[in-house]
Amino acid sequence: MTRFSAWSVFRNGLSGQSGWTRQWRDPEPKKQYDIVIVGGGLHGLATAYYLAKNHGLKNIAILEKGWLGGGNAGRNTTIVRSNYFMPGNRQFYEHSLELWENLSHELNYNVMFSQRSHISLLHSPGAIDGAARRYNTMRLTGTPDAEIWDLEKLKQNVPHLNYGPDCRFPILGAAVQKRAGTARHDAVAWGYARAADALGVDIIQNCEVTSTSRSGNSITSLTTSRGEISAKKVGFAVAGNTSRLWQMAGFNTLPIESHKLQAFVSEPLKPLLDQVVVFGVGGAHFYISQSDKGGMVFGGDLDWYKSYAQRGNLPIVQDVAECAVSILPCLGRVRLLRHWSGVMDMSMDGAPFICKTPLDNLYLNAGWNYGGFKASPASGWYFADLIANDRPHETIENFNLDRFAQGVSLDERGAGPDPKLHG
Amino acid sequence: MIRINCPFCGERDHSDFTYGGDGSIVYPELDAPAEEWVEAIFQRENIRGVQTETWHHVSGCRQWLVVERDTMTHEIHSIKAAHEGVAKVLEAGK
Ligand SMILES: Cc1cc2nc3c(=O)[nH]c(=O)nc-3n(C[C@H](O)[C@H](O)[C@H](O)COP(=O)(O)OP(=O)(O)OC[C@H]3O[C@@H](n4cnc5c(N)ncnc54)[C@H](O)[C@@H]3O)c2cc1C
Ligand SMILES: [Zn+2]
């Protein structure tokens, strides 16, 4: 693998770009691994990387049923932030943001992390007070870049929003996290894959796990579309398919439902929006940013009913379009280029699971919904730590399956045990 | 768009309804052990395939319905009123 540097870019520019080599190998699966991670999305890839990098472990494979990054890893709206409130969530997402800040260097791969600010619009005095409470908590617990902006400051920074006094929800101010922003999702998957591969991790694509074999309280091997693979430790990181893998491991229920979320991108425009802007009031839920190619990238709510179909419904398209023109009326005649959807785990409190399971050698990484992209570096970091040391780090102590029975759910939104409500 | 054939109103877009959730859950007795309640409230089978679920016809007759739907293809296999007495009356009138 060639290391990327200014010099290698320059040299290959002079030699007709002929000096580049494969970014990662395409190995045949071995019969036996020490650690097998199922799922080649961001969480699986990051986990394998940190297992090798932080813990010096070898003989690791990632099994991916399709191609790497073909799931939610390549379908999200790429928002990265750490403005969480609940203890546990706060430390976890802040750690993730710190990893993001150095990720391009860490991986020697440009993930195009752009700390362009995340701006949540506020529409009532009550909302401003609520945001002040949350953002003050952030400032007091190690997230220094949380700010509340008044209307004047917001207008100077984001001039195109609908500031009309007669609009349905007049804008009064905003809660801002300045270190938040976006990254190139595919590059994150490729960067982790390349770095993990360089440390010896086998990335096996087109390899679907279809069942497991158990002996006593352990999984001994996995049946896959590319043969039987045995493993000493197994980690699941399969996003919206967690329940299916869980049932293959011999269990029945989980505090998870699979739901789909859509994303949209418009035709490219000249630079219009420098930040990530979020609009959420009444029934509305909408977030938007502009990609480097100029496309407006945006999304809204879930499709409102449980679904494994990787295709979105039309009422949400309408809903999202209505939100778009109500805060950015200038988008009214912009054409939509593409829209798509991804199947995600929605947990009963909207928070994830990085935990041990009733089986001795099975570890679970699941329950990622709206926050799963921003979480991916820390998710891999803590999941690797869990698998290597066979105990949860104190930051993720509550990211377990037991928290509902214990009465310590991480319900950031206070919406109760209804997966579709955790936006 | 999923089309739901409400037994009271006829076929309508799903946007006429709100989704309730897993309709196969049987809630335990009020004084049942906490574990049974944890199971009913938080744990889901999360079926990929045909599942029993509830929908509420909020913009129509406001009745709750029990629907069998394939969560992969969105094909609907059966629809009936959630209230057993009402479902029986409808059935008898057929
Ligand atoms: C439309 C949309 C917008 C989003 N926007 C944001 C955002 O702005 N910010 C944010 O933080 N998060 C966002 N998310 C969430 C985020 O994308 C996901 O939570 C995250 O990508 C999930 O983790 P992953 O990358 O590991 O998942 P995936 O990429 O889905 O990886 C899971 C992999 O497991 C594989 N797999 C499944 N079953 C098997 C099997 N039996 N055998 C082998 N492999 C299997 C799948 O093929 C898949 O590649 C968004 C999600 C969607 C869908
Ligand atoms: Zn009806």
Image (cartoon, coloured by chain):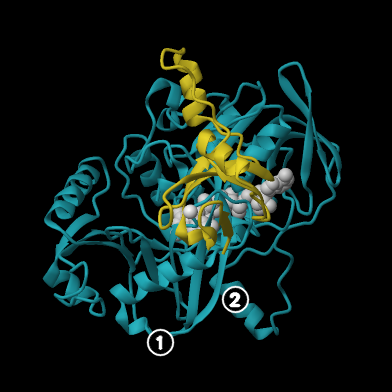
Chain colours: A cyan, B yellow
Q: Which residue is mark 1?
A: A333
Q: Chain of mark 2?
A: A
Q: Secondary structure at mark 1?
A: loop
Question: Is A319 above or below relative to A233?
Answer: below
In front of the other: B24 or A321? B24
**Drawn side of residue A100 relative to residue A306, left or right:** left
Say which element carries label 2: helix
Left or right: A328, with A266 as reference point: left
Residue holding disc 2: A9
The residue shown at (44%, 71%) is A318
Q: Pointer 2: residues within 10 angstroms few (<14), some, or many (20+)?
A: some
Where, quadrant-wise, is the N terminus of chain A in this rendering?
bottom right
The lab-note entry on whether marks 1 and 2 share a chain reads yes
The one nearer the camera, B80 or A142, is: B80
**Mark 1 or mark 2: whose residue is earlier in sequence:** 2
* Circle 1 or circle 2, nearest the eye: 1
The location of residue B11, given as percent across then percent down, is 56, 61
Res A192 quadrant in image: bottom right
Residue at mark 1: C-beta within 8 A of ligand 1: no
Does any portion of residue A367 appear in the rendered image?
no
At 25% from the left and 40% from the top, the residue drawn is A141
Q: Is residue B22 above or below residue A261?
A: above
Q: Residue at 59% of width from left, 51% of height from top?
A: A307
**Residue A185 location in percent, x, y?**
53, 62
Q: Nearer the viewer, residue A385 or A364?
A: A364
> Which amino acid type is shown beneath numbered disc 1?
Arg
Residue A143 position (above or below residue A184):
above
Q: Amino acid at mark 2?
A: Val
State the CA–CA distance, disc 1 to disc 2.
40 Å
Give the image location of residue A361, x and y in percent. 67, 25
